[in-house]
Amino acid sequence: MHSQKMTCSDLEDVPCPLCQSKEADHVLTGRDLINSMPGRFNVIRCKSCNLMRTNPRPTKTGIADYYPDHYGPYNNTKIKENPTTSHQYKRFRAGIKNFLFNSRTTYIPRCKPGRLLEIGCASGSFLHEMALSGWSVQGIEFSKKAAQEVEKMGYPVFNGSLERAPQPASPFDMIVGWMVFEHLHNPVSDLAKLRAWSTPDTWLVISVPNASDLQLELFGDSWHDLHLPNHLFHFTPKTLGNVLSASGWKIHSIHHQRTVNNLIVSLGNLMISKGYRTFGSSLIKLPGRLGKLRYLLHPVGWILSKFGQTGRMTVWAKINE
């Protein structure tokens, strides 16, 4: 049973952070399909710049209610060591999988190691992987419990929001954020802050859901990556480019991830909404149960990625000089 605090989280009505306009069109109304938290939330599209956002939305204080300790990314990123498997072999295997499938959200090709910052590092598995590859790593994580997992491994982590994070001792060579910038209350100012922590050679690498995907039109409020109310913004390649530009960044490349998981889970959500709960629940669990059989679906993901229709994109950017 959810606590009364969770059902009464404060909501705020805010203008578009990109153009400051309050004029917007209603896109849809949905609910939390991942954590089953209470509430109904509107997605609107700015009439001036087309940036989609959740509005009204939970305040910076109230949003914490929608990140319970069992929140998926916290558990899925716990550091797991297999002493029988060398790190070099794991990196080689990951590289082969990325070359064939490009399915990993967090894949970084071989770059010269330097100083790396991960925004929303959760329980630290990516930081750990990069540290083993020679990077000097640190993270920023909103969840106290997840940040404690990172600290246990000896990696520096700031527990709190990016907005409140202190100035680093020196610039970073790479800043990453995996499915996190859609969660931020003001991505424009936060990205501008990261620009100040960078040099012209710094890479900014972020992955976000792609709201220009046909899946949003097909599934509506059943779209898995809508993730209300945690996702406060719903980017398209164009609006993300505009947000980055307003923050002092310029897109270098966009990669559409080769995955069909979102499609399968969204279909499961839709079936449940139509009353087919058993079938829908089976579809939602299917990606996690396929094991190696999931590779049979990658040709479909490859085709969908060519048309930008997999629901997720990874963007590489540098400072716009």
Image (cartoon, grey):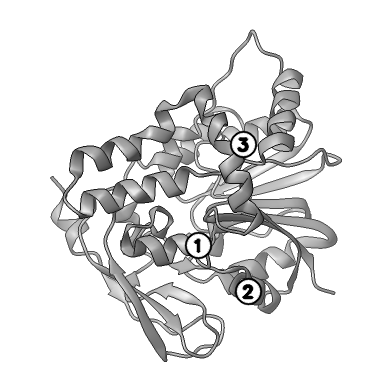
- Residue linked to disc 1: 182
For numbered disc 2, what is the local secondary structure? helix
**Which of the numbered marks, if any, corresponds to residue 238?**
2
The image quadrant where one finds the N terminus is top left
Q: Residues within 10 Å of mark 2 (few under 14, many from 20)?
A: few
Q: Vertical placement of 60 versus 122: above or below?
A: below
Q: Distance between the residues labelled 3 and 2?
A: 28 Å
Q: Which of marks 3 and 2 is nearer the N terminus?
A: 3
Q: Vertical placement of 154 versus 196: above or below?
A: above
The image quadrant where one finds the C terminus is bottom right
Q: How far apart are marks 1 and 3 (CA)?
A: 19 Å
Q: Which residue is drawn at 66% across and 51% down?
A: 176
Kind of residue at disc 1: Glu
Occupied quadrant, residue 217: bottom left
Kind of residue at disc 2: Lys
Q: Vertical placement of 186 versus 61: above or below?
A: below
- Residue linked to disc 3: 126
In the displayed structure image, the side of residue 277 where residue 174 appears, left or right: right
Q: Distance between the residues labelled 2 and 1?
A: 15 Å
Q: Residues within 10 Å of mark 1 (few under 14, many from 20)?
A: many
Q: Residue at x 40, y 81 (%)?
A: 14
Relative depth, front residue between 196 and 263: 263
Horizontal and vertical percent for residue 34? 32, 48
